[in-house]
Image (cartoon, coloured by chain):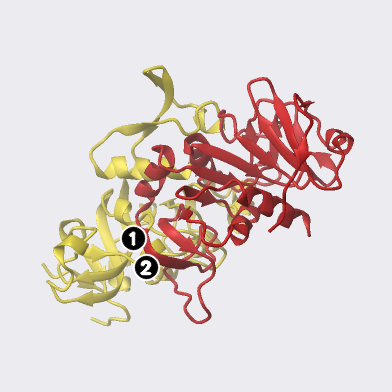
Chain colours: A yellow, B red
Amino acid sequence: MYKVNTAEEAVRRIPDGAVLMIGGFVGIGTPQDLVDELVHQGKKDLTLIANDTARPNVGVGKLIDAGLVKKAIVSHIGTNPVTQKQMIGGAIEVELVPQGTLAERVRAGGSGLGGVLTPTGVGTDAAIGKETIEINGIPYLLETALKADFALIKARSADYSGNLRYSLTSRNFNPLMAMAAEIVIAEPDEIVPVGCIEPDAVVTPHVLVDLLIAKGATI
Amino acid sequence: MNDKEIIARRVAQELKAGTLVNLGIGLPTMVASYLPAGLDVSFQSENGIIGMSALPDPGLAGSNLTDAGGTPAGALPGACAFDSAMSFALVRGGHLDVTVLGGLQVDEEGHLANWMVPGKIVPGMGGAMDLVSGAKRVIVAMTHTAKGEPKILKRCTLPLTSVRRVDLIVTEMGVIQPTEEGLVLLETAPGVTVEQIVAASEAKLLMPKVPGVMGIAA
């Protein structure tokens, strides 16, 4: 199956109101062309699942700037005053999730699990509305799985079949999100011939990846 | 020596060879600068790396390697990178020896609040709740007061980061160890009297022994 596409064509498949997982950590490891195209095409009422909302005009911060996000499920908005302003003004709903819990909720979503039990947040505001389950005398919060309609992934390299490898701290949530969405669109820095990424170096298996974005491609 | 440097120098003395350490953004990051030369400590950054080093050499900063604040960082030979689930499995799973975090408030029970001020600023908890819940040892590195107001309180007024008791509080005025009995004043900074530190704290400070003097030499 030929997966290579342009960012413009790939983003056309995303409807208004979609639930999106987008990789990145304060913009590092975020698929920039796909985010720019979401803004260009004005996709609105989005639910954004991401580590953070980056900074104004950086990474997914561009979606916030453009007012395209109606709900954000993130661990941190401290680097983006625009998100805080929109939240206080009621323009955006923000669900703050401890970072390790967010990673596990995404992992659970992609792994066929209903959720996970974590000690993080027990007895704090993060426990409000959640079930506490005691195991061997230790209390844990029941944190439910997260899934998305689309995952937008940044990779270091892809081969033409869709195998992905990542680079350093730009990996972050990307491999987890590539498991947890109906449609996975990956934006690698380079696309190499099949066989050029050795099997042991593949982090995301090709079967998970639906579309690959070629940098600057006009197909 | 400014307040932050005093705190960073004292915290650096707590780090032992062969341990895995996570330094929070801001003041805690400065701790790495004051480690004894050659001390073998591995630094984890929660955005997915062990073996992070200070700023890369000029011209070698890459867009794929930053600290948890998004600032370009370097990596030492032997560094390893991983995803966010692995990163926090290390934190919660008993593999992280020490975390050093900033604080807004700590109270007599050793509870830390450091992730939001309702109605004013809501940055979010990021990785702080996982780090405080999961690390084997939690060190809070913070200034003793904020705009003259005590940050070491009888009871935190801000939302807690965890109900786990932190292990050590290091400020520019002294070193305090939360225990089951309460907050024990272990050390005072050079030139700071016990009376001054008591006056700058709302919480009761216990002194089962005469507090020593904080060592902040390089």
**What is the distance, in whole Å, between disc 1 and disc 2 at their CAs?**
7 Å
Residue at 56% in and 32% down: B162
Q: Nearer the viewer, residue B213 or B184?
A: B213
Q: Residues within 10 Å of mark 2 (few under 14, many from 20)?
A: many
Q: Chain of mark 1?
A: A
Query: Given the image, on which type of amino acid does mark 2 rest?
Result: Leu
Q: Nearer the viewer, residue B48 or B194?
A: B194
Q: Nearer the viewer, residue A27 or B20?
A: B20
Q: Is residue B147 above or below residue B183?
A: below
* Label of residue A34 in the image: 2
Q: Does dot 1 land on a helix, a strand or a loop? A: strand
Query: Given the image, on which type of amino acid does mark 1 rest?
Result: Leu
Residue at 54% in and 26% down: A123
Quarter that holds the C terminus of chain B: bottom right
Q: Which comes before the other along the chain, label 1 or label 2?
A: 2
Q: Does dot 2 land on a helix, a strand or a loop? A: helix
Residue at 21% in and 63% down: A201
Q: Nearer the viewer, residue A64 or B95?
A: B95
Counting labels gives 2
Q: Chain of mark 2?
A: A
Residue A132 falls in which quadrant of the image? top left
Residue at 82% in and 48% down: B190
Question: Mark 1 and 2 residues: CB-CB less than 8 Å, in contact?
Answer: yes
Quarter that holds the N terminus of chain B: bottom right
The answer to whether tags 1 and 2 share a subunit is: yes
* Residue A86, horizontal then vertical, whole percent: 60, 52
Apparent side of residue B38 relative to residue B159 in the rendered image (left or right): left
Q: Which residue is mark 1?
A: A152
Q: Is residue B74 above or below residue A147?
A: below
